[in-house]
Amino acid sequence: MNGNEIASKDDALFRSIEYTGKNFYYAVGIFVTIIAFAVFLYAGQIISGLGVTGMAQPVSWGFYIVNFVFFIGISHAGTLISAILRLSKAEWRRPITRMAEVITAIVLAIGGLHPILDLGQPGRIWHLVTSGRLQSPLLWDVTSITAYFAASTVYLFLPLIPDIAILRDRGTKPRWLYQFLSWGWQGTPKQHKVLERTINILMIGVIPIAVSVHTVISYIFAMTVQPGWHSTIFGPYFVVGAIFSGIAALLIVMIVFRRVYHLENYLKEIHFSYLSILLLIMSLLWFYFTFCEYLTTHYGNEPDEMRVFFYKFSGDFAPYFWAMILCNFIIPVAILSNKKTRKIKGILIASFTVLIGMWLERLIIVVPSLANPRLNYPTGIYIPSITEWALFAGGIAVFMMGFLLFAKFFPLISVWEIQEGRASSVKEVAHRLRSYLPDELEEDDITKALH
Amino acid sequence: MPRWGMVIDLNRCTGCGECAAACKIENNVAIVGPEESDQGRTMLWMDILTEYEGEYPNVKVRYIPRPCLHCDNPPCTKVCPVRATYLNEDGIVAQIFPQCIGCRYCMAACPYTVKSFNWYRPEWPDTMTSALNPDVSARPAGVVEKCTFCIHRLQIAKEQVAAENRDLEDGDYVTACTESCPTDAITFGDLDDPDSEVSRLRRTARAFRLLEELGTEPKVYYLYEVE
Amino acid sequence: MTSRTIQFLQYASIAWIWIFVLCVDGWIISLLIVARRLHDAINASVAIGIIAIPLFLGIASALTYVFFGLKKHRLVEEPERREL
């Protein structure tokens, strides 16, 4: 079979690259405007100082750190779907892995930039290079995020190579780009072996790196002795929360691009159904961790911890805290446990509320412990300024634009994996299933069962 | 080598705030305007904590002057990513202003919340510029600062003592707050010298330290009031 | 763009990856040296160095393996063969 012949069956997957409509330019225009506004206000922050934000003593960390944790959290989408589903040989992952890997790469870059936005003296960032202290959790962060960014970019690129080769052979412009990036791929069996062997090693290797990233971010808080932060559960809690918000972001991206680029044939109801069941499981897991955290605090009844506890439960932060429980647990579980509401519209609503809820969770972790110091100070107040809101919007705009630009050059769904699925997966899975069963089935029985 | 510490007698403290004012003037701490102050950006290296106990008419007020406690096991130095804050050989938790990148991790990590931040470039009214202390370096916007046990005075004392060909000892320098206190509530000196006033006072029954259970080993001791 | 330029870009890309990884590893080693000189945070530096330095080298090695593996197993005479 000729590559071009097979490819024309999946023409829809190349539409985003080969056709640029008006809407693309409108969208890019909107995002560029938002980003420009954010850059303008950030310049104001560089000139005047961090005073243009809403931070003060004692709440000396605000939106920038909240968004840092939030964006890096979303990056766990790529690892879970791509690596774990590949590892468990789940066939339904095929149209999803590319988008997941792209989310990870973009969001890590955005998240990794946020601590720099938060610095009072960003020009001195090179001090980290010359005299950094590896005892500081911030340095652990720099190391693990760099490692994860490198690993996930490689993990995005390697399965992209065969698709780049298809684009090269289709003659898509700019030709030189696809010729260069395809690294001489021709689809020979030996080349396949090289690629698959490396992808297999990476898919195992990237999981501990990803787990370490969010664990290390939680250590920024957990390694201090502040009430509400110094908790042993923070590592796993943050990882669970990250996977949770990552799946929600992935679902939203899938739903949006399915609509925009008419990918209904590839992203079917079943894909959303399975992924949303994972979202439901993560919601229950998240609730379990949250419950453990707050029950232990309340039962221990330590005065400093209880002040932070009541600030969240019934004090100034109560509206955000209960909104978080509603958005992270009540709404998603209600929508996703019922098969009738677990349709694309319901999943979209559930995913949005999860993203809002997880952002609130980051806010609830950062601010209340700072607002309630141990010594006898008045409780801190934090009202974010327009600079902080603008940079938040800017971060989201960069994410959307990064996605759009990626879709303009590369297929959002892994073409060769879909084709591989069509050609060989059915037989493979049938053989696998046979190996689970106690009886020895004949080849004829399998063929009969398949038709 | 002296290990510098402080004892604050809460029995003598009247909460007048002289120490806080003297510290600001000595160390060129920025005057933050009224709007910024309302937001909580007042910069007080020496702060006065006010504690109220009981209900009216049996209210007890306690004033606790709180400088940086210069812990021997500081939680803030552990988390600094660039070595801008560190425990030096004099026992002082020093702050290197040109090194600080303004990440404010040390501010978040300090359980006593002693650190201040320059949210804007420090400014003083014209009438105050003649009161600025030339011995203390100015800080730009975006760096963290805190009480340094008047380390500039320590440096001057070291030079003086070297010129006199002897070793540094208790009494060779005191901090601005110690000097300014009208009731002599603050005592400053060498904790390692068994004959010094601070050593004697900190071994009395009235001595306690803030948040001792955290294991930070602060070098500022307080003396309980007597009834 | 000639195929020679494309080839040059491809070799340059793998070279850049090694430069990046060696810079990161060099940075971690330099932080280790500073920590030893100042007697500050040695344990943490060594621990992180032991994990991070081989990790980055592994990532660069994986990419290099793919790069040269793809080059080696090309069928130069038969550009139409597409086996999937």
Image (spheres, helix red, strand yellow):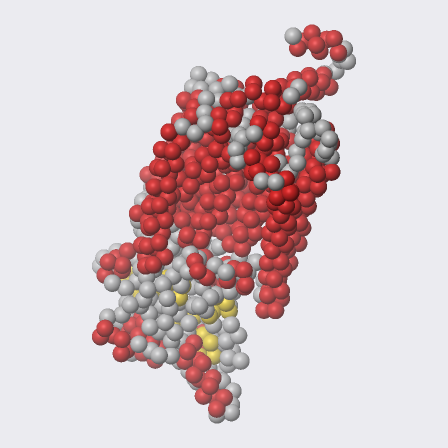
Residue under the point 27% across and 60% down: B37
User: Which residue is pictured at 57% across the width and 58% down the height?
Assistant: A134
Which is nearer the eye, A294 or B88? B88
Residue A116 at least partly seen: yes
Between B26 and A202, the residue placed more toward the observer is A202
Vertical side of C83 occupied by A198: above or below: below
Query: How many numbered dots are placed on residues in this image?
Result: 0
Residue A372 seen anywhere in this rendered image of the structure: no
Q: On screen, A129 above or below C61?
A: below
Against A237, residue C36 (above or below) is: below
| Left or right of residue B6: residue A212 | right
The quarter in which the C terminus of chain A is drawn is: top right
User: From the viewer's perspective, is C19 left or right of B140?
Assistant: right
Q: Residue furthest bottom?
A: B164
Q: Horizontally, is A158 left or right of A286 in the view?
A: right
Task: Return the x and y of residue A347 as percentages of the image width and height.
Answer: 44, 24
Q: Residue at x 35, y 37 (%)?
A: A30
Q: Position of residue B131 (x, y in %)?
A: 28, 78
Residue at position x 56%, y 18% in the image: A9
Q: Quadrant of the N terminus of chain A?
A: top right
Residue A404: % across, % down: 45, 34
Residue A147 at x, y = what percent? 58, 47
